[in-house]
Structure formats: C-alpha cells, structure tokens
Amino acid sequence: MTMNTTVTSTSLEPAPGARFWTRLTSNYGMVLLTIALFFLFVALQPDTFATALNFKLLASSKSVLLILALAATLPMVAGKIDLSIGYGVGLWQVMALSWQMAGLDYRIVIVLVLVGGGVIGLLNALLIELAQVDAFIATLATGQVIFSVTYWYTGGRQVTDSEGLRASAFDQISQWSLGPIPGPFIIALALGIIVWLFLDYMPVGRYLYAVGANPAAARLTGVPRRKYVVGAMVASGMMTGVAGVILASRQAGVAQANIGPEYLLPALAAAFLGSTTIRPGRVNGLGTILGVAIATIGISGLQQVFPGRFFLEPLFNGLTLVAAITIASLAARKRVAKADATPIATAADQSGEPPGEPDGPPPEDLIDATSPNRKD
C-alpha cells in the first residue's frame, strides 16, 4: 500500500508575495551585515584593513577554519553534531608530519590521513546509530580520546622536522596561489561550493535534509536514514583530515599537540550562524561560508582597531555562537509552530483506511518539503 503524504515546507523563507525588503532582510540580512562590517572597518582602518596583504593573510589562515566549519555542517544537516572535528584536526596535522618523518611518501600520508578521518567518522556514526548514544556525547567522548592519543603520541611536546625529512611538495600545498588568491583558500572555497551544490541541487542532499528535518517521516517513506547519517559523519571526518593536511603544510615542519581544539568553537559558530541566512532555518553550505566570512572580518577588524587585545577573538567567537544558537532556536520554534498550524492530509484520512508501510520509492513531496529550493 502506498501512502501519499502532503507536507508543507517549514522553512522560514518569506512567501513569494512578500515585500522585497522583507525577503531581502530575511534571506540576506547576514550578507548585508557582513558588507556593513567590511565598510565600517575600511573606514576605521583604511591603510591596513582593505589591503591585498591583509586579504592574503586572512584567506590563508582561515582556510582551515572554513573546511572545519563545512565538516560540521554536513552532520548538522542530518540532525547530528560532530564535536570531534577540533580534536581530529590536531591529530591529523601531527600524523601528516610524523609519518613523513618516518619515511612515508607524502602522497601516501595524505591518503592515510583521509582514510583515518573517514574511520573516525564511521566510529562516531556507529556509536550514534548502533549504540544509540546521543551525537553530542558520542562525538565529545571520541574527541577526548583523540586528544589523549595525540598527547600520548607526542608526549605533550611539539613535533619538529629539524632534519627536513618532509617533502618540499607537501609544503607547497599551503604555499601555492592563483594570482593574489592563496591556494588553501581556493581548496576550502572549492569544498564549500561542492557542499552547497550537493545539499541544494543533488537528490542525495534533499534526502539528507529530509532525514534531519523529520527522521521518523523519512523512515516511513523509505529513506534509508541510517545510511545518510553514516555518510554525513564519514564525510565530516574526511574533511577534517583535509584540514589537518593543510594545517600541517602551513606550519612548515612543526606540529603542536594542543592546536586542534581552538578551532572547534569558531567552526560550530560559523555553521550555526550560517543557518540564519541564505536559507533561513536550515544549515546550508553558502551560509557556512558567510558565517566564516563575518567572523573573519569582525575579528580582524577589531584586532586592528584595538591592537594587542588578545581576548577579542575568543570573546567574539563566544558571543557569535550564543547569538547564532539563539537565532537558530527561535527559527526552530517558528518552524514548528508553522508546521503545527498546517493541516496534514494523507490518503488514509481521505479513504478511512489505516496507514501502512510504504511499498514504493519515497514520495517527492516529502523530500520537496525539506528542499531549500521548494517554493510554497
């Protein structure tokens, strides 16, 4: 028996008939804020902020953060959270250098790091799906284990390639550029575009949104929920490995055991902040990129206006995370209220027959209901 379900989208995007300014501020308010912050700091620091040198420094240094924010985005789309990414990037930047010092070719090292990241993502998924451990607790515990392994391997000291055993081509991963644009930023931006296209325009992305929006409904309509959760966690782990490789390359022969956790809070803040823009109410790839951009502009501008105030970066990240979570929580409440106010019609309601298990492919209307491209 096929159950046809009509579900109305619960996104917070304005209706097509809404005023232009309402649609602009709702979908692109964060974009306007980013532009406003940029011009504010240009006016306050015209000689240092809007310069090619500052752009190169920021684009290169924040590329690892952007990749980690994207790694956090995929599990969040599936309704999970991965807190192990900050600890994972610390482990993989240590191993990317150490394995080369042990004599392995840098290309083999990169493959090992990516596979290792995927394995950690798989372990997280098994804890979440098979052991039914809450994702927050499971990934936090995994992260602590990873942190302990990193400290055990390094003895709590930094790893230094004093003899130059690493490949020169490995250093080039972070040193190449395309004109004025640093190579690591190009890699991170390319990953961001892939995530955006994957989530917004690929059928798999729509299924992933369906799993995150309503796991029970996704299961009843035949969506293999567990498979998509595992895929999201594995992809997150592999992207963490990419960030570790770039970080190790950028540090030119030095790897620190405690460097990873400092990326966790900014990455989560960027992903949460991204859910408030472009596709309001949904975590999305373009929003995450914008979240990293606004954090980068805000922190860099404040540090130039108030030099030497080292507390500004953690303060900005903390306040941004609080604001992002607050906005996301309010958006979720509005989404739930909108869904509760919308009647749900089913074939069983019309025929009087009890609902049964679906015997065909998942109905498109459920997937469309959670698609960012749906227009209600």
Image (tube, helix red, strand yellow):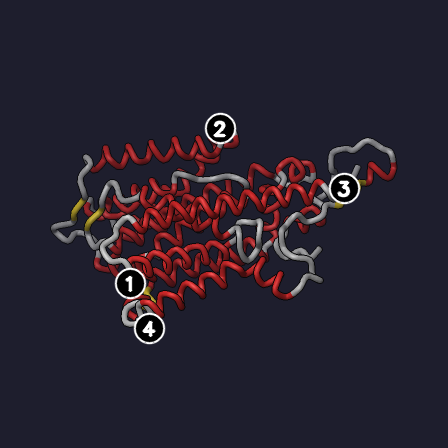
Callout 1–callout 2 Cβ contact below 8 Å? no
Residue kind at label 2, given as amino acid type:
Val
Tell me which label, 1 or 2, sits earlier in the chain. 1
Callout 4–callout 3 Cβ contact below 8 Å? no
Q: Which residue is mark 4?
A: 179
Crowding near the residue tagged with mark 4, few <14, some 14–19, many ≥20 C-alpha atoms within 10 Å? few
Q: Which of these two is toward me, 347 or 100?
A: 347
- Can residue 239 be seen here? The reply is no
State the separation of the CA atoms marked 4 and 3.
54 Å
Identify whether 51 is placed above or below 300. Answer: below
Quadrant where the N terminus sits is top right
Q: Which residue is mark 2?
A: 133
Residue 57, which numbered label? Answer: 1
Residue 299, image quadrant: bottom left
Crowding near the residue tagged with mark 3, few <14, some 14–19, many ≥20 C-alpha atoms within 10 Å? few
Crowding near the residue tagged with mark 2, few <14, some 14–19, many ≥20 C-alpha atoms within 10 Å? some
Residue kind at label 3, given as amino acid type:
Ile
* Mark closer to the observer (4, 1): 1
Q: Residue at x 15, y 53 (%)?
A: 164
Judging from the image, what secondary structure is the residue with disc 1 in? helix
Judging from the image, what secondary structure is the residue with disc 3 in? loop
Q: Which of these two is toward me, 181 or 50?
A: 50
Q: Which residue is mark 3?
A: 344
Asked if residue 210 lies left or right of residue 230, the reply is right
State the separation of the CA atoms marked 2 and 3.
32 Å
Callout 2–callout 3 Cβ contact below 8 Å? no
* Mark closer to the observer (1, 2): 1
Tell me which label, 2 or 3, sits earlier in the chain. 2
Residue 346: x percent and y percent? 79, 40
State the separation of the CA atoms marked 1 and 3.
52 Å
Tell me which label, 4 or 1, sits earlier in the chain. 1
* Mark closer to the observer (2, 3): 3
